[in-house]
Amino acid sequence: MNLREKLSEFPLGLAPLIMIGLAVASAPVALRSSAGRQPGALRFWSFAKSHYEEFQQRLPEYYAAHPDRQVEMTLNGLNVMRDKLLASFLSGTGAPDLVEMEISSVSRFFAGRPEDCGFLDLKPYMERDGLYAAAVAARYSAWSNRGRIYGAPHDIHPVVLVYRYELVEPFGDLPGEVKTWDDFVRFFQKPGILDVNRDGKRDRYALVLDQASFFHARVMALQQQEGLFNERGEVVFDGPGHRWAFDFIRRCLYDWKIAKDAPATGQDLYASLDEGEVLCAVCPDWLIGNMARDYPQLAGRLKAMPLPAVKPGGLRTSTVGGTMIGIAKQSRSPDLAWEAIKFLYYDGPSRAARFRETRILPALKTCWTNPIFSEHDGFIADPPLGRLLIQNSNVPPFYQGRYGAEAAEEESKACSVGIDATPAEGYAALKRGADRIRELMRKDRFAEN
């Protein structure tokens, strides 16, 4: 085995290993820089441009309340920031005080023993200040590992269904008639709704379903309380929830032919809705915000409703994506960092005002009584989007485990090869991916810690 092959076995990948070397080489400079920082100075890394810009705008307010403090903010690309942070944690130098992390990357920081995690456990801070119950409890699952909460949740990202109401309503009352996905199929099999010319050919599609990614399969699996792992840390994405989602997506695409295979997000989706080629879209709150920002031509032309449930009485929402903010153990001022988190994430008026710009429902439940959430947003015609999101805020938990990133990769691989295959082949693809993660966990010498 050559050196590159040996290095490729490093569990976190080559990029963090290279950055560890750079971090160690630059450690004297980093230590001098840290020593030269003023008391009360905090370093903060973020990957989200909108968060960075918002926080920059709010810094004067923070400084007015805390004139003795200083915040140095840095905007990074997500992958670069993740690798820099891993290298900082592993080398023991160079980490910021505060960092925002995206849901797809955070599990990489849970490897090893609990005491080796580079993030502080924030649960004691939350409980001390009476803030643990202020956020949606299910949302802590994504940022927790082995009884510790490593991040305060920024959002919950409930998922709803948006639809071109002027094209749908001539055929019936979609929110009134559709309570389950079976109801959805029946509604869009009505004569003339998709076959506009009534010549046996599809002129429209009920919705987009992306079989090349995990997006829609995971949304539907989570409606059945099945994510990547369960609350005991066991791999479950080859379970009945994902199998049902595979079967339903396959039948929508190839048997009933009511769905279009296309990306779940982006300009193609927006244009398809605009042109009336697609009548509905499965949308987390952030996707509605992106659509309103990037495709204003749809303003006032969409209505929204809860997701159809898998079974009568079942969950009518789901969740996709997410962001946390955490404190690095290397921080010299963890108490000041926590105070900054409270300013950024637990200030009700600013969280409510931010909803107006992004349509992202904050995880902070105590701000939901703000009248902003009852306003029509100017993009979704009806009902008021904030009210609908709050009514569907009972999102399912999303447990990560230490192999969450690897599990998500295997889930996506299974979707890309398994949805358009036979049911047996699809189930086998899911099981192969899940078994690979089980084998990683079996070999993990810290699995029981």
Image (cartoon, rainbow, N blue to C red):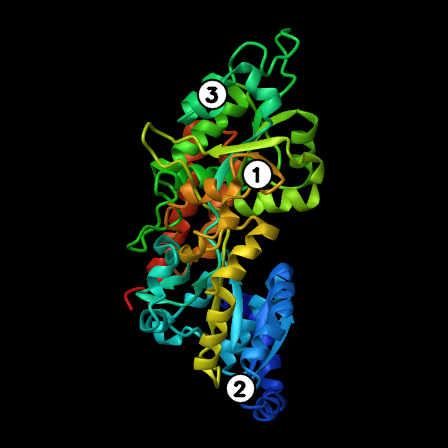
Nearer-N-terminus badge (3/1): 3
Q: Is residue 320 left or right of residue 224?
A: right
On screen, residue 272 above or below 224:
above
Q: Secondary structure at mark 2?
A: loop
Q: Which residue is mark 3?
A: 185
On screen, residue 262 above or below 195:
below
Nearer-N-terminus badge (3/2): 2
Residue located 50% across and 44% down the image? 374
Looking at the rendered structure, the kind of residue marked 3 is Val
Residue 398 in the image: x percent, y percent?
39, 51
Residue located 62% across and 80% down the image? 22
Q: Which residue is mark 2?
A: 40
On screen, residue 438 above or below 275:
below
Badge 2, how many Cα within 10 Å: few under 14, some, many 20+?
some
Q: Secondary structure at mark 3?
A: helix
Viewer-nearest of discs 3 and 1: 3
Q: Quadrant of the N terminus?
A: bottom right
Which of these two is toward me, 48 or 394? 394
Instruction: Kindly report the distance in space between the C-alpha atoms of the residues bearing marks 3 and 2.
Output: 58 Å
Q: Secondary structure at mark 1?
A: loop
Instruction: Kindly report the distance in space between the C-alpha atoms of the residues bearing marks 2 and 1.
Output: 47 Å
Q: CB atoms at circles 3 and 1 under 8 Å apart? A: no
On screen, residue 256 above or below 43:
above
Looking at the rendered structure, the kind of residue marked 1 is Ala
Tell me where residue 208 sits by quadrant: top right
